[in-house]
Amino acid sequence: MFENFKSAMHNRQHKKWEQLRRRGKRSFIVRRGVLRWGGIMFVLTLFTNVFGRHMKMNWLLVVSLLIACPFVGYVWARCVWYVNEMHFRDDLKKQDSSKSESA
């Protein structure tokens, strides 16, 4: 019963990764990691510290967050890229082997 759902989900993920992959690794790392992840974490951390903890705006905090958040986003996106590439290549190998067995 759930095999069709799993297969459909897997196919959607595979197609989505193919689209992201076509744009390239650098684009993925910059857009998804540095800008999206790093930007969101920068804003949330700054917002939490200033408004949640009622801290004054400390320029050292702002500068350190501007360096740390994009860097961690870069590392995160690079790791995600390699893990997804590994899964993608495994799937391609499985597809190739199943095509050769059926032929």
Image (cartoon, helix red, strand yellow):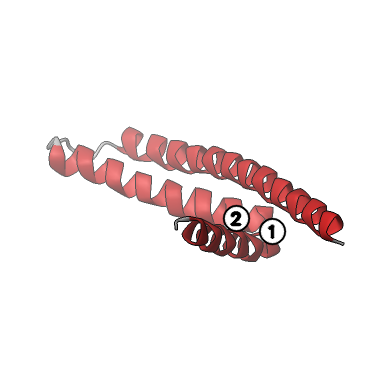
Q: In this view of the protein, which residue sits in the foreground, 85 or 67?
A: 85
Q: Is residue 33 above or below residue 72?
A: below
Which quarter of the rendered picture does the N terminus lie within? bottom left
Q: Is residue 77 above or below residue 26?
A: above
Q: Are marks 2 and 1 in contact (CB under 8 Å)?
A: yes
Separation (CA) of disc 2 from disc 1: 6 Å
Would you say 36 lies left or right of 27 here?
left
Kind of residue at badge 1: Gly
- Image point 45% across, 36% down: which residue? 68
- Image point 21% across, 41% down: which residue? 48
Residue at which label 1 appears: 24
Q: Is residue 59 above or below residue 103?
A: above
Please tell me how crowded label 2 is: few (under 14), some (14-19), or many (20+) other residues with Cα within 10 Å.
Answer: many
Label 2: state its secondary structure.
Answer: helix
Q: Position of residue 40 (x, y in %)?
A: 36, 50
Q: Position of residue 64 (x, y in %)?
A: 40, 34
Would you say 44 lies left or right of 89 here?
left
Label 1: state its secondary structure.
Answer: loop
Q: Position of residue 24 (x, y in %)?
A: 69, 58
Residue at which label 2 appears: 28
Q: Is residue 21 above or below residue 86?
A: below
Please tell me how crowded label 1 is: few (under 14), some (14-19), or many (20+) other residues with Cα within 10 Å.
Answer: few
Would you say 56 lies left or right of 61 here?
left
Q: In this view of the protein, which residue sits in the foreground, 50 or 30?
A: 30
Q: Position of residue 93 (x, y in %)?
A: 78, 49
Q: In this view of the protein, which residue sits in the foreground, 93 or 55?
A: 93
- Image point 51% across, 62% down: which residue? 4
Kind of residue at badge 2: Phe
Question: Could you say which quadrant of the image residue 100 lies in?
Answer: bottom right
- Image point 81% across, 55% down: which residue? 96
Which quarter of the rendered picture does the C terminus lie within? bottom right
